[in-house]
């Protein structure tokens, strides 16, 4: 038998780096689970697999864990939303509380630094969890090599093959490009959601193409800091997946905050003029007379698409749908039984928490347990101010399905806590089955809606009726009392409205 030191000597004489020999040794190690992608779905799946006693490795090409969400999505955007809200609060509301502030100004560079520190702390924290639960971490781009192996182009150079009994694809999504308005984040004139996180100054005028969650959140950040924001939306409504009544009221609130809207409008061409102004050519979505709109910065936020190209799917006969989502069965298995997929790369809302739930359920199934995700109870939140949160069916969906329902609502204007802190725009809306009173949908515009929706999700998960929630004691004075009273309004009558 040749010793390790002898092998190294032979490799040196042949000109092959010892590091490559070490990689080949790693390649022969077999794992129970290999997770490709270190975003919310991937890293959660990896940790859960390790907790269930599975030898686990996670492959991620970004160089930091957390995926889009932690690095250039959910987390940094919430940091900026919080900073800009504090600035706006100080500018407009401090005086009535007797707080005198002079020469108020926003240092954008410090705001961005605070955002970066939050991201660094959280992504580093995931690496710490990997070490705690003994999850191996390989930095590189992984693609399927066989039903039980993943080929990785390492970030440091070279390649590695990982053998695993089960492979979970958690490859995420990417920004959907708009051909008529090509993004150049480096130029800082036409940016996507990533570029909008790092603008060094407040643009005087910002055009947001797309009236969805990302565009309205990032538009809110820069609007609060002084930018004139115009939202250009192809459809005749913003946030098209929301309950229409909620979406209509939400748009009214944003208009009061200074947002301008051009609905049923499409962008047909884009030019950057000599003075740096971005000129958008627009026309009606249905066609018609052309017009132009000028801005200093344009944010393209027209959605996201699965990141499923060049990961070896075709070679194994794994199918995708027309927009690139990997086809899976109820147990997250692809056409290849040992290969699973979760998160943004399969059907369903592209939400971090949806991916996390799928990651845990998928691993539990692999381990022989009964993993399950209730897709009727996946909440969605828009982190503007006020926040918008919803779960379950909209009125439009219930009507289309022919379901008879009762509706109850309660305004925050009638909530004592909201009135006391002068934060009372919005309402809570409950939809319940007309016969059984089982809650079918919950829609909230208001302060802390993103936190309040959790009570609704829990109620729906366990099949609660509106009366069940209405007869549950809620602390006073709290915003959550609005939730209770909306449920009272659904099955009977509210007390304070």
Image (cartoon, rainbow, N blue to C red):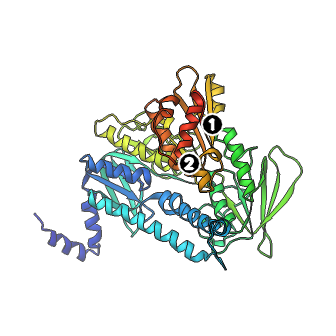
For this orientation, the residue located farthest to the right is: 289
Q: Residue 170, image x and y in percent?
A: 43, 49
Q: Residue 125, image x and y in percent?
A: 37, 63
Name the residue carrying label 1.
409
Q: Residue 351, image x and y in percent?
A: 51, 48
Q: Is residue 227 left or right of residue 158?
A: right
Residue 300 location, quadrant? bottom right
Badge 1 crowding class, 10 Å Cα cut-off, few under 14, some 14 to 19, many 20 or more, is many
Q: Is residue 8 left or right of residue 205?
A: left
Is label 1 in a helix, a strand or a loop? strand
Badge 2 crowding class, 10 Å Cα cut-off, few under 14, some 14 to 19, many 20 or more, is many
Q: What quarter of the picture does the C terminus occupy?
A: top right
Question: Which residue is pictured at 73% across the width and 44% down the height?
Answer: 237
Question: Which residue is pictured at 30% across the width and 35% down the height?
Answer: 369
For this orientation, the residue located farthest to the left is: 1
Residue 394 vs residue 406, the one in the foreground: 406
Q: Is residue 54 left or right of residue 103?
A: left
Residue 247 location, quadrant? top right
Q: Is residue 32 visible?
A: no
Q: Is residue 294 above or below residue 314?
A: below
Q: Is residue 348 visible?
A: yes
Mark 2 or 1, which is nearer the eye?
Answer: 1
Residue 312 vs residue 193, the one in the foreground: 193
Q: What quarter of the picture does the N terminus occupy?
A: bottom left
Which label number is shown at residue 62? none
Q: Is residue 66 above or below residue 14?
A: above
Q: Give the Cα distance between marks 2 and 1.
A: 14 Å
Name the residue carrying label 2.
449
Q: Residue 332, image x and y in percent?
A: 41, 38
Residue 440 vs residue 215, the one in the foreground: 440
Q: Earlier in the sequence, mark 2 or mark 1?
A: 1
Is label 2 in a helix, a strand or a loop? helix
């Amino acid at each position: 038998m040749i010793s390790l030191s002898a092998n190294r000597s032979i490799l040196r004489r042949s000109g092959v780096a010892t590091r490559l020999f070490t990689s080949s040794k790693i390649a022969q190690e077999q794992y129970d689970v290999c997770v490709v992608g270190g975003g919310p779905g991937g890293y959660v799946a990896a940790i859960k697999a390790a907790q269930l006693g599975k030898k686990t490795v996670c492959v991620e090409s970004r160089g930091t864990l957390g995926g889009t969400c932690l690095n250039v999505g959910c987390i940094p955007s919430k940091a900026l939303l919080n900073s800009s809200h504090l600035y706006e609060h100080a500018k407009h509301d401090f005086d009535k509380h007797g707080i005198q502030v002079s020469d108020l100004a926003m240092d954008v560079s410090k705001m961005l630094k605070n955002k970066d520190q939050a991201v660094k702390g959280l992504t580093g924290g995931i690496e710490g969890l990997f070490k705690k639960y003994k999850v191996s971490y390989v930095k590189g781009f992984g693609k399927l090599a066989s039903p039980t192996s993943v080929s990785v182009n390492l970030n440091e150079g070279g390649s590695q093959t990982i053998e695993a009994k089960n492979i979970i694809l958690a490859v995420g999504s990417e920004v959907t490009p708009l051909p008529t308005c090509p993004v150049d984040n480096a130029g800082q004139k036409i940016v996507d959601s990533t570029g909008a996180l790092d603008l060094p100054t407040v643009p005087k005028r910002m055009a947001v193409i797309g009236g969805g969650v990302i565009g309205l959140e990032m538009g809110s950040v820069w609007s609060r800091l002084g930018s004139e924001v115009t939202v250009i939306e192809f459809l005749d409504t913003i946030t098209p997946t929301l309950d229409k009544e909620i979406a209509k009221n939400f748009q009214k609130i944003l208009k009061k905050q200074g947002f301008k809207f051009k609905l049923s409008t499409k962008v047909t061409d884009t030019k950057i003029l000599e003075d740096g102004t971005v000129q958008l050519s627009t026309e009606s979505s249905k066609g018609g007379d052309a017009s132009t709109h000028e801005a200093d910065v344009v944010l393209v936020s027209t959605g996201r698409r699965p990141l499923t190209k060049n990961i070896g799917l075709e070679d194994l006969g794994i199918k995708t749908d027309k927009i690139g989502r990997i086809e899976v069965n109820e147990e997250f298995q692809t056409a290849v039984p040992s290969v699973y997929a979760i998160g943004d790369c399969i059907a369903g809302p592209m939400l971090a928490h949806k991916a996390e739930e799928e990651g845990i359920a998928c691993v539990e199934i692999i381990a022989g347990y009964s993993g399950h995700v209730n897709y009727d109870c996946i909440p969605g939140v828009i982190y503007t101010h006020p926040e918008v949160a919803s779960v379950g069916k909209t009125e439009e969906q219930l009507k289309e399905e022919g379901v008879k329902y009762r509706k109850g609502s309660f305004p925050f204007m009638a909530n004592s806590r909201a009135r006391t802190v002068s934060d009372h725009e919005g309402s809570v809306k409950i939809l319940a089955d007309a016969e059984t009173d089982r809650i079918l949908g919950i829609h909230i515009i208001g302060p802390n809606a993103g936190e309040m929706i959790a009570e609704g999700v829990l109620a729906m998960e366990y099949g609660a009726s509106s009366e069940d929630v209405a007869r549950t004691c809620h602390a006073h004075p709290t915003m959550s009392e609005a939730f209770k009273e909306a449920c009272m309004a659904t099955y009977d009558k509210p007390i304070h409205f």
